[in-house]
Amino acid sequence: MKRVAFLLANEFEDSEMKAPYEAIKGAGHETVIIGLKKGEQLTGKNKQATYTTDASIDEVKADQFDAVVIPGGSSPENLRLNKQIQQFVKDMDSQGKLIAAICHGPQILISAGLAKGKTLTCYPPLKDDLINAGAHYVDQEVVVDGNYVSSRMPADEPAFIRETLNKLGAPVTQA
């Protein structure tokens, strides 16, 4: 099974963390919540989910993981300017590892300089940010471009989870 990092800060979109986290963990993969500080309790913007970070970004390296998931909400905004967060996703990309970002998650990809030349989607109000960063924006529930999976919003979670699990090599069950 794979080891999957979740980049998280306060004010994440509750369901965009909870649903992929539970699905990936439920498929037998190891999940590790990475934030700016180890042991920090983080709360979703809707106050429906709380998680504690397993590690701080300065304790981990990309080569310890097979994939990274970036939930949306305000969490990416709180992480995107951190140089270690940026380097982590750059290293994941250079190693060809899965990068799955939903909603505001692509903000981290923009700040890390990884959006250029990629076909991505995001929360619709961020469309211009992606385009200005050199990405090809498409408005659909899930976009797969090489080692990238991106989705727009909570309503897209089933497709986002399906494609993320598919990239992880987990068996996908049809409802």
Image (cartoon, rainbow, N blue to C red):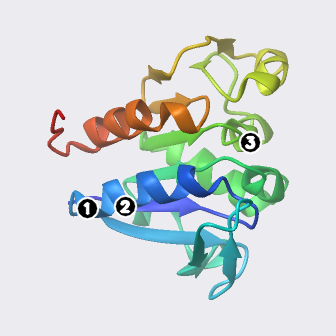
In the displayed structure, 173 sits above or below 49; it is: above
Q: Nearer the viewer, mark 3 or mark 1?
A: 1
Q: Amino acid at mark 2?
A: Glu
Q: Amino acid at mark 3?
A: Ala
The quarter in which the C terminus is drawn is top left
Q: Secondary structure at mark 3?
A: loop
Q: Amino acid at mark 1?
A: Gly
User: Are the two marked residues, 2 and 3, in contact with CB atoms closer than 8 angstroms?
Assistant: no
Give coordinates of residue 21: x percent, y percent: 42, 59
Query: Residue visible at 67% across and 13% down?
Result: 137
Q: Which circle's residue, 3 or 1, is located before the other in the chain?
A: 1
Q: Circle 2 sits on which residue?
A: 22
Give coordinates of residue 67: x percent, y percent: 42, 51
Give coordinates of residue 170: x percent, y percent: 19, 46
Q: Circle 3 sits on which residue?
A: 112
Q: Secondary structure at mark 1?
A: helix
Give coordinates of residue 124: x percent, y percent: 74, 22
Query: Residue visible at 33% across and 56% down?
Result: 24
Q: Is residue 9 left or right of residue 111?
A: left
Query: Residue visible at 37% across and 54% down?
Result: 66
Q: Is residue 132 left or right of residue 24?
A: right
User: Are the two marked residues, 1 and 2, in contact with CB atoms closer than 8 angstroms?
Assistant: yes
Residue 119 versus residue 124: which sits nearer the camera?
A: 124
Query: Residue visible at 71% across and 60% down?
Result: 46
In the displayed structure, 128 sits above or below 16; it is: above
Q: Nearer the viewer, mark 2 or mark 3?
A: 2
Q: Circle 1 sits on which residue?
A: 26
